[in-house]
Image (cartoon, grey):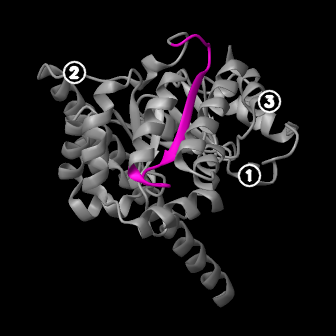
Amino acid sequence: MRQTNKSIVSFLARASRKKEKRKEESKKRKDRKMKEKKWKETKTKAKSKGGKVVELCSSFGKQRGSMVALIPYITAGDPDLPTTAEALKVLDSCGSDIIELGLPYSDPLADGPVIQAAATCSLARGPNFDAVISMLREVLPQLSCPVSLFSYYNPILKRGIGKFMTIIKDAGVQGLVVPDVPLEETEILRMESSKNNIELVLLTTPTTPTDRMKSDVSASDGFVYLSELHWSDWYSHQCQCPSSDSATRHQIEATSKPVAVGFGISKPEHVKQVAEWGADGVIVGSAMVKLLGEAKSPEEGLKELETFTKSLKAALI
């Protein structure tokens, strides 16, 4: 009898815990819906004020001669800021559809060794955030393609999210990627970026669970950044990755938004393969950064960058 009573008590306790857990999950879902509603209202207000609403997705398609967008990435200040300014012009003249510019950060955990080294070199040479913004104010009006910044969250928090968004908007930046902030913590980022007509692009991966991926895709502006993080061993090897093929195709087909695939893509054949998978854009980072960082001189690096970018663009035509 005592044993039966203990079993009943134990059962009721488990049932009570499950009930509380369901209540907590229900509350979280309601909170997320309220946040989403608040964010959408903020975006609607921003549009109603008559300001220019930039859409990075308009850079995809046949805008510059190819069905798939070419999105190169370089690190600001590596090898130096004047070279970065010239590199932006070279990338634009070679047909880039969007350019990603990385703000150097001391702890770039989401980047591979090449971009980590570039960030370290840039920081050692001294160009700070203000210097980068000053350079962008001068260069961006000369470009025909939009520029999106790639920044870790801490530098944004350091300046204040609202102030950071206002600064990059005034400099002419049209998009922002923050790789180290989860969706659950993007509410203020999304609201402030919307106020300033900055497209906040969120990342997902081929192994992201479907429900989670749908949330990331829904919240992402402009396009979806599909990061093939597990391609590190594929770098510099032949373009054969059947598992990535299947997983990547699934993620691409799961959304109507443009999907750009990045991380580890370094050759024209890589670019062509990703295009065949159905991607709307291809992001090339480490290979670009390596050319500029390892060149004998900035001038030589810019020439190699031009040749390489043209070869990637040709693979997409």
Q: What stretch is highlighted in magenta?
A: 64-81
Instruction: Determine if residue 120 is in view.
Output: yes
Residue 98 showing in the rendered view: no
Indicate left or right for 244 with 138 as reference. Answer: right
Q: Nearer the viewer, residue 165 or 6?
A: 165
Mark 2 to mark 1 CA distance (whole Å): 38 Å
- Label drawn at residue 52: 2
Relative to 162, say whether 11 is above or below.
Answer: below
Q: Which mark is residue 269?
A: 3
Relative to 9, say whether 201 is above or below.
above
Mark 2 / mark 1, whichever is N-terminal: 2
Q: Does the magenta stretch include residue 190?
A: no
Instruction: Mark 2: give few (<14), some (14-19) or many (20+) Cα within 10 Å.
Output: few
Total tally of numbered discs in the picture: 3
Give the amino acid type for the residue marked by disc 3 in the picture: Glu
Q: Report which quarter residue 271 is drawn in.
A: top right
Question: Can you give x and y, in whole percent of width and height, for residue 169 in the image?
Answer: 23, 37
* Of marks 3 and 2, the one in the foreground: 3
Residue 284 image-quadrant placement? top right
User: Residue flagged by tag 1: what amino acid is it?
Assistant: His
**Lower sequence index among marks 3 and 2:** 2
The Cα–Cα distance between marks 3 and 2, rounded to whole angstroms, is: 37 Å
* Residue 230: image tag: 1
* Pointers 1 and 3 in contact (C-beta within 8 Å): no
Q: Inspect the magenta stretch and tell me whether residue 70 lies in it.
A: yes
Residues 134 and 178: in front is 134
Q: Where is residue 265 in the image (x, y as percent from the top left)?
A: 70, 40
Is residue 160 found left or right of 301 in the rendered image?
left
Q: Is mark 3 on a helix, strand or loop?
A: helix
